[in-house]
Image: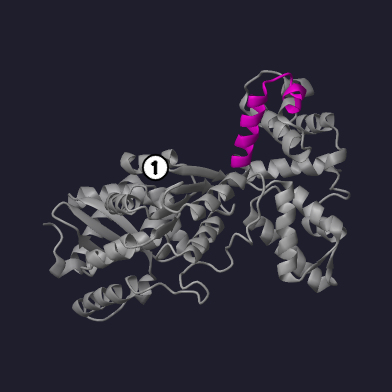
Amino acid sequence: MWISSENESMDSEKLWHGICGELGVSMSPASFAGFIKPCFVRSVTPIDGERIIMELAAPSIFLSHTIETKYYSLIKQAAEKISQKRCDVALVIVEANKEDKRPKKEVVNSQVEEARIGLFAPPEENKQTGTNLNTRYTFESYMVGSSNRLAFAAGKAVVDYPGTRHNPLFIYGGVGVGKTHLMHAVGHELVKKGVGKVVCITSEQFINDFVGSFKSKMTDAFKKKYRQVGALLIDDVQFFGGKEQTQEEFFHTFNELTNKQAQIVMTSDRKPEEIVGLEDRLRSRFQGGMMVDIGLPDFEMRLAIIKQRAIDLHAEVEGGAFELIANTYTTNARELEGIFMNLATRATIEGGILTKEMVQKTMGLPADSVKSTKVRPIKVISTVAKYFDFRNKDLLGTSRKADLVVARHITMYLLRVTLGLNLTVVAELMGGRDHTTVMHAVEKMEDQIEENMDLRRKVMAVKSALFT
């Protein structure tokens, strides 16, 4: 066996040295020096004669996230090549210069004891529910609109029929759209319903507990923690992708819970079929229940969000300012709340009341920006064409040039979302297209606006030009 538990620290150093040798050849010098070199292998835990778990320490959250999203596969492949074993990589955040300086044997024993105490002790509980659910994330505080109505209804159905209807419930959508809020809201109601122990965790915590169970030789405690429950709620399951041993353990956990009709709720930033490195057997189980997506909030929902935030912050806001903010920023709820908090703070400093003029001045918006209902469709088409240096007939034509397709999709999106026209009307305005073409274009834009900062800026620039 390549890994020796008696000389784990030394073998960890040898393994990392070998991995760095592999990556130093395949990566650019700048990427290697910036993202790989600052890391180190904290521990290597053998699972059996063919599998290991390598705990890779990064000195910051940023570095850990970058490795997770860009270099995880490269590191995993290099580790398997050097160790000649199947390897899962568990990322942890540890400042290298703050590593324990005690004798190695004492450190290893201490780490085992910490895992024994910390990983399987009850999570920090809030006093109201007796669980680690966020007290702010309830159905009462959840804003419902066209973008999340189906997901909300599915969550309610889970509470009414736990473990039988919509099991598992798989909620997916982009960053900041309210997936975690809805999952915690379901958890609170399941606690009230008395379904049994409700465990709500992140995928990172599940992975870390799994690694810790092998290091501390407490796999039975791990299984008890996650299998003897009435409901298991897991956030961001997309991070299971590529982690073979974790997926195998979760597969068995999933089966045992569903067999005894314990409810499972999961969130992800993408559909199961889009999670890279997810095993087919898990993918099919994720798809076997109810899958619901949450999109960007519509105008009415954005308006409700910032009005509620104003109540929470005890902020005084002029009526027109609410509409201006909600109409201008077609972003996710989290960013929208951040924008409003920034504006409300500035208003407090400058006089107390947030006015429409203050919003325009602070955010660099043109005067009289909120007149979406008075904008004629032809102006939308002309404004987009002018912004992208096309002619109106180009947007209404059939050319498939990349830039033209983007401009055309933005036009459809603004006609549909900003002016509120129905799909059939937009389709007719856009050269007599089929309404399903418009529907797909709008859905694509809603997805891309959330992820693509450059596209979002273009849309906002066009919207600003519309109301100038």
- Where on the picture, by quarter, is residue 93? bottom left
Q: Where residue 96 sits: x, y (%)? A: 36, 71
Give the residue displayed 73% in from the left and 55% down from the top.
Answer: 304
Quick check: is 467 in the magenta stretch?
no
Above or below 461: residue 214: below
Q: Where residue 399 sits: x, y (%)? A: 66, 19
Q: Quadrant of the N terminus?
A: bottom left
Residue that label 1 marks: 276
Report the span colored magenta.
425-447
* Callout 1 secondary element: loop
Quick check: is 445 in the magenta stretch?
yes
Above or below 430: residue 246: below
Instruction: Say left or right for 396 vs 56.
Output: right
Q: Quadrant of the C terminus?
A: top right
- Where on the picture, by quarter, is residue 56? bottom left
Q: Where residue 139 sits: x, y (%)? A: 60, 59
Of residue 303 and residue 408, the one placed in the foreground of this image is 303
Give the residue displayed 84% in from the left and 40% down from the top.
Answer: 373
Give the residue displayed 77% in from the left and 33% down from the top.
Answer: 421
Instruction: Say left or right for 168 vs 306.
Output: left
Of residue 401 and residue 370, the one placed in the foreground of this image is 370
Above or below 238: residue 131: below
Specify the amino acid type for callout 1: Val
Give the residue displayed 57% in from the left and 48% down from the top.
Answer: 153
> What kind of secondary structure does the magenta stretch mostly adopt?
helix
Instruction: Say left or right for 268 vs 323.
Output: left
Task: Name the residue furthest left.
Answer: 1
